[in-house]
């Protein structure tokens, strides 16, 4: 500040300005010093006491005196101290994250790891020097040996029991959508949790297959801990990272065990940290395996690999979370539920003889496990004569806000096909009976759609799917069981309490599946048509005079002999004779040529959007939350969306915490 010609305060009396202001002063000082040293000594200014910088000329107060240099050095020393402090803080934060990540159990607010893990060798020395070496680190400093594949690696002390069945790959056709480019437009979101390609020539073949096996760990103490169901042998320093057991796609590297080598297992059991099981133990644990879908479609297939072994040894323990619905499904499969030992993820369980069935890839279970489950559940072939609607009206999230209207319009448009709504309080036998009879199954993404395992081949499944990074397990299962899968993307995220469903799109799909013309305009005329009369093609609708008329802009007709329907909110059809409506991209909202076309307008006036309007204030690199906005109010900037995502992360942790 002295060199800049401004009043100088003592170094212990810094101005109370913002960091940006302090940074500005520091930069001015730096460049003024550089320029003054470059042009050499400067004579005192005869004019204003304030400094003036003009081209290459610089006018300052007397420069390069010992007092000025000392003052400038002190200021620079203060700035350097601040920079060093920032660097040390960042280093400590990064080190904290790294230590948490590698097993040092710290309260780490930066990385927020929820479990402790054994440290790697590269972090043992640093952590010990900081006095943070936990009891989980073995005193001799030996590494854990990681087993990745029990089938292809030679692992001493582990016997493989092979079922003789090899899982097979299978193709997965693209989801059927009204907009043929919907998957391609949203491929980034649709491919986060699973592999899916939008190219119609790609078969989307499922490749995560393996030979079916049960691993038998015997002779050594074998333990399991945590929500992941991590298997390890502490005294052989071996940990199992069997492929498909963990979901590294979104969760990163698998964990390492935390075990107290300084205390005997018996002492740990007395302290309530560990439980020793005397009997042989079968372990069927994976992250989220206690959640309804994951239990039915992923865990029960593993239980079936153990069914005969469990029956042959009634004293064998079956380690599971033990929620009420788990017991019901085990009884349905004929498993003795008295063998279940309830699992607490905060305790380590150990036994001398452990059975470990082949893990199931999350979201994408193998075809053979699903078919074997259908066989054990005695699914029958019966007449398929009903539409099944799976409701989430009693759930905490993803409730369909216009569900009553949706059910009403389906019943009104297809009176010859009974509609049965299921709400999740039915018994397994009742659910099985209903889904066996399903000609078409409709429902929002959720646990209730797991019951498509009861559906007969060629049954149509219509999933009302949220747009924000959805898992496509029901698309995958539909392909495995040879069901026809239709997708209706809705502007919502996973934990959204309620979301809106475009009713006309659902009706168009039912119209396609059942081959029924639901248009009042075409129903009377179509009965009188001769076999030689040409049907109305998609994009047109039959008038009361029997003439095929083109759909007006803002409307579409997806099917032959279909009805011109208004585009759903958030979608547009700018041209006549449209066969589908397109969702407006992020940063745009759907409306008419002259104004906004909101939800009430669409369903009162029966006129859909014809143009996507740019959200106001859209900067060049500005991003918005979700596509398909229907009003300017839904043009949410990325800053607000980031706050929403942060709230979702908290809700996510609360929603998926193991009971």
Image (tube, rainbow, N blue to C red):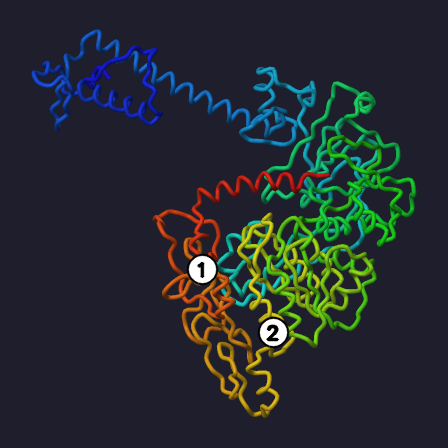
Q: Looking at the image, which residue is at 74% across and 21% down?
A: 261
Q: Position of residue 291 (x, y in %)?
A: 71, 46
Q: Position of residue 375 (x, y in %)?
A: 81, 60
Q: Label 1 near label 2: C-beta < 8 Å?
A: no
Q: Position of residue 231 (x, y in %)?
A: 74, 36
On screen, residue 21 versus residue 320, left or right, reads left
Q: Looking at the image, which residue is at 50% across and 56% down?
A: 186
Write down the residue under mark 1. Answer: 584
Cα distance, mark 2 to mark 1?
Answer: 25 Å
Question: Tag 1: Cα neighbours inside 10 Å, few (<14), some, or many (≥20)?
Answer: many
Q: Position of residue 192 (x, y in %)?
A: 55, 50
Q: Is residue 221 above or below residue 306?
A: above
Quarter of the image for residue 150 reads: top right
Quarter of the image for residue 350 reads: top right
Q: Is residue 603 above or below residue 195?
A: below
Which of pointers 2 and 1 lies earlier in the amino acid sequence?
2
| Secondary structure at numbered mark 1 | loop
Q: Which mark is residue 512?
A: 2
**Of residues 546 and 599, the one drawn nearer to the viewer in this rendering:** 599
Q: Looking at the image, which residue is at 48% across and 58% down?
A: 628
On screen, residue 603 versus residue 119, left or right, reads left
Quarter of the image for residue 435 reads: bottom right
| Secondary structure at numbered mark 2 | helix
Q: Looking at the image, which residue is at 65% across and 28% down?
A: 116
């Amino acid at each position: 500040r002295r060199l800049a010609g401004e009043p100088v305060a003592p170094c212990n009396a810094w101005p109370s300005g913002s960091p940006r202001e302090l940074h500005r002063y520091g930069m001015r000082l730096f460049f003024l010093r550089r320029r003054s040293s470059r042009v050499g000594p400067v004579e005192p200014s005869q004019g204003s006491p304030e400094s003036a910088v003009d081209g290459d000329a610089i006018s300052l107060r007397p420069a390069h005196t010992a007092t000025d240099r000392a003052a400038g050095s002190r200021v620079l020393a203060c700035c350097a101290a601040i920079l060093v402090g920032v660097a040390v803080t960042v280093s400590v934060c990064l080190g904290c994250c790294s230590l948490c990540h590698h097993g040092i159990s710290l309260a780490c607010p930066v990385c927020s790891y929820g479990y402790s893990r054994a440290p790697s060798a590269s972090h043992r020395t640093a952590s010990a020097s900081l006095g943070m070496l936990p009891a989980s680190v073995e005193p001799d400093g030996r590494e854990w040996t990681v087993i990745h594949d029990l089938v292809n690696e030679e692992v001493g002390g582990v016997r493989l029991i092979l079922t003789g069945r090899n899982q097979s790959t299978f193709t997965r056709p693209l989801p059927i959508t009204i907009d043929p480019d919907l998957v391609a437009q949203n491929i980034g979101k649709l491919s986060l949790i699973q592999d899916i390609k939008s190219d119609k020539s790609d078969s989307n073949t499922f490749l995560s297959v393996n030979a079916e096996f049960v691993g038998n760990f015997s002779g050594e103490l074998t333990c399991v801990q945590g929500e992941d169901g991590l298997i390890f042998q502490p005294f052989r320093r071996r940990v199992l990272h069997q492929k498909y057991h963990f979901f590294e796609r979104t969760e990163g590297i698998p964990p390492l065990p935390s075990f107290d080598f300084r205390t005997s297992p018996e002492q740990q059991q007395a302290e309530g940290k560990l439980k020793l099981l005397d009997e042989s133990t079968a372990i069927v644990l994976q992250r989220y395996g206690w959640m309804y879908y994951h239990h039915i479609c992923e865990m029960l297939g593993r239980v079936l690999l153990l069914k005969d072994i469990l029956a042959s040894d009634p004293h064998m323990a079956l380690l599971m979370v033990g929620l009420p619905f788990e017991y019901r499904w085990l009884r349905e499969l004929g498993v003795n539920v008295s063998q279940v030992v309830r699992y607490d993820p905060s305790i380590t369980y150990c036994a001398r003889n452990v059975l470990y069935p082949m893990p199931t890839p999350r979201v994408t279970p193998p075809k053979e496990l699903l078919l074997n489950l259908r066989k054990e559940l005695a699914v029958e072939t019966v007449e398929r004569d009903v539409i099944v609607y799976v409701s989430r009206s009693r759930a905490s999230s993803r409730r369909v806000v216009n569900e009553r209207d949706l059910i009403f319009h389906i019943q009104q448009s297809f009176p010859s096909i009974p509609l049965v709504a299921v709400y999740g309080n039915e018994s397994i036998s009742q659910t099985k009976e209903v889904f066996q009879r399903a000609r078409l199954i409709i429902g929002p993404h959720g646990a209730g759609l797991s019951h498509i395992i009861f559906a007969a081949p060629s049954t149509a499944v219509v999933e009302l799917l949220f747009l924000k990074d959805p898992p496509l397990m029901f698309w995958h299962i539909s392909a495995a069981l040879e069901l026809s899968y239709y997708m209706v993307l809705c502007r919502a995220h996973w934990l959204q309490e309620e979301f809106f469903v475009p009713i006309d799109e659902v009706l168009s799909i039912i119209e396609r599946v059942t081959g029924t013309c639901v248009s009042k305009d075409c129903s009377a005329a179509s009965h009188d048509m001769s076999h030689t009369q040409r049907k109305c093609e998609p994009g047109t609708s039959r008038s009361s005079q029997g003439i095929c008329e083109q759909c007006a802009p803002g409307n579409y007709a997806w099917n032959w002999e279909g009805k011109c329907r208004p585009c759903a909110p958030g979608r547009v059809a700018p041209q006549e004779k449209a066969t589908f409506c397109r969702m407006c991209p992020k940063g745009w909202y759907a409306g008419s040529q002259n104004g906004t076309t909101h939800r009430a307008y669409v369903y009162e006036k029966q006129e859909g959007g014809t143009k996507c309007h740019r959200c106001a204030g859209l900067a060049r690199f500005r991003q918005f939350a979700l596509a398909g906005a229907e009003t300017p109010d839904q043009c949410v900037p990325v800053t607000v969306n980031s706050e929403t995502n942060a709230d979702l992360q908290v809700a996510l942790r609360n929603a998926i915490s193991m009971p």
